[in-house]
Amino acid sequence: MDIKTILHSQREYFLSGSTRPISFRLARLKDLKQTIIRREQEIIQALKKDLNKATFEAYATEIGLTLEELKYTIRHLPAWAKPHKVKTGMANFPAKSYIIPEPYGIALIMSPWNYPFNLALTPLIGAIAAGNCSIIKPSAYAPHTSSVVAQIIGDCFAEKFVAVVEGGRQTNQDLLSEKFDYIFFTGSVAVGKTVMRAAAEHLTPVTLELGGKSPCIVDRDVNIDLAARRITWGKFLNAGQTCVAPDFLLVHKSIKDELLYRIKKYITIFYGRNPCSNTDYPKIINQRHFNRLLNLLKRGDIVTGGQYSKDKLVIEPTVIEHITWEDPVMQEEVFGPILPVLEYENLAEVIAELSRQPSPLALYFFSTNRKNQQRVVENLSYGGGCINDTVMHLATPYLPFGGVGNSGMGAYHGKTSFDTFSHTKSILNKSYLLDIKLRYPPYNKNKLTILKHI
């Protein structure tokens, strides 16, 4: 596809004002919703081919979340898009002040392979709601889902409004060399830096949804069985290929053995005694990532798991212990079904150590001790997270989702998505009825006295 031609047509269409009426935006969002519902089975089949996702997992983490975001946005968009009145200070009396949300123009949405449907369409919902035109660049690593996304977008929208551009690295480079009005990127830290450098050439604002090593801390005061169940689910969802999956465990020494015993139990309950033969257990996306994960298993002792299938690109849920902060598995985001475990005795030392690490995208803390909950929340920097659960803070349009520092910048979901893709224009509407001459020269001491009083 000719990127320059698409951009030119979208620029002309946006400048025509066609995308600005709320009725237009609502109609397009409803079209998208109905098309997703109609093509549900095609989406599920594509996700099965790309990642071997079970139907339930594909619907719960991809289709269902996207439809929920659509329903919420359609319901609230008219209120979000209205001009918002604010107070006017005495210095500007008499006047009215208000804020108008307006679209940026053309948005580039670059989505990853791990949740290739959800993470392509959910940002698009915010872009459409705000009145932008958009180009979606899906990941080449999930070609079947990328193709279905392109078909859905083609069914719903004219190319001059929303287009999908498929391809690999060269396509990414070609897109980033063009001028967009907003860039929304989800992916690795390394590629995120490339995106930000390219955006800087055109002074384009960006949202970067990256990742990092998201800790899961388990206190001694905890419901061990429930913690084990929720950690096992959150870690091995999508075979650990989730940007907010618990990357490693920090477990109080007194409960470590019991917790690991129960995690092992739940791995068997969830995936069977031979997960590599479980037809509902997701695969690793490609050979390169598969080999990278196997290399991470060379240090530490395996508590459970460790088996794999080269032919299927499957690594069973694996827990390793007796590792250190210096081991390779602790030097990079795991992004796979390997759970390293460290133990601790003093929560203050854990907080001190994590404070020295880059801010992660998520953090999870399991404890019934409210004072300890407060200590963790107030003293550590991270994008978002849960107390006594994992991953589920993503499953609500009421909570913004985004990183901080090394894990990204900006946020989305719900109204935050609308805000992300909107420029807030501030307007002061001054009356002709009265013009206070205090601000005008010549200045004197009396005017200064009055100014300070005001």
Image (cartoon, rainbow, N blue to C red):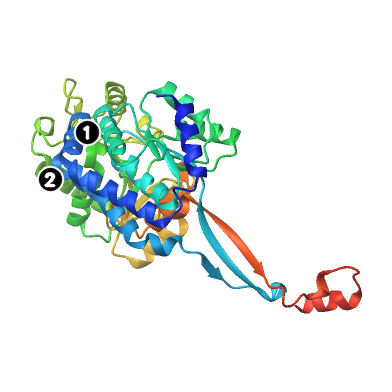
Q: In which quarter of the image is the N terminus?
A: top left
Residue 167 or residue 300, whichever sits in front: 167
Residue 307 or residue 20, whichever sits in front: 20
Closest to the camera, between mark 1 and mark 2, is 2
Q: Residue at x 15, y 36 (%)?
A: 281
- 361 left or right of 228 in image: right
Q: What residue type is labelled 1?
A: Ile
The answer to whether one can see residue 68 in this image is yes
Q: Position of residue 148 (x, y in %)?
A: 25, 33
- Quickly name the residue at label 2: 265
Residue 288 or residue 368, whichever sits in front: 288
- The local secondary structure at tag 1 comes to strand
Q: In this view, does 88 lie above or below 291?
A: below
- 274 left or right of 258 in image: left
Q: Position of residue 388 (x, y in %)?
A: 28, 58
Marker disc for residue 404: none
- Quickly name the residue at label 1: 302
Residue 200 or residue 76, whichever sits in front: 76
Q: Residue at x 33, y 52 (%)?
A: 27
Q: Which residue is drawn at 69% across and 76% down?
A: 93
Q: In this view, does 40 lie above or below 75?
A: above
> Which of the two discs, 1 and 2, labels the residue nearer the N terminus?
2
The answer to whether one can see residue 391 in this image is no
Q: How far apart are marks 1 and 2 (CA)?
A: 15 Å
Q: In this view, does 140 lie above or below 400?
A: above
Please tell me how crowded label 1 is: few (under 14), some (14-19), or many (20+) other residues with Cα within 10 Å: some
Report the label total: 2
Please tell me how crowded label 2 is: few (under 14), some (14-19), or many (20+) other residues with Cα within 10 Å: some
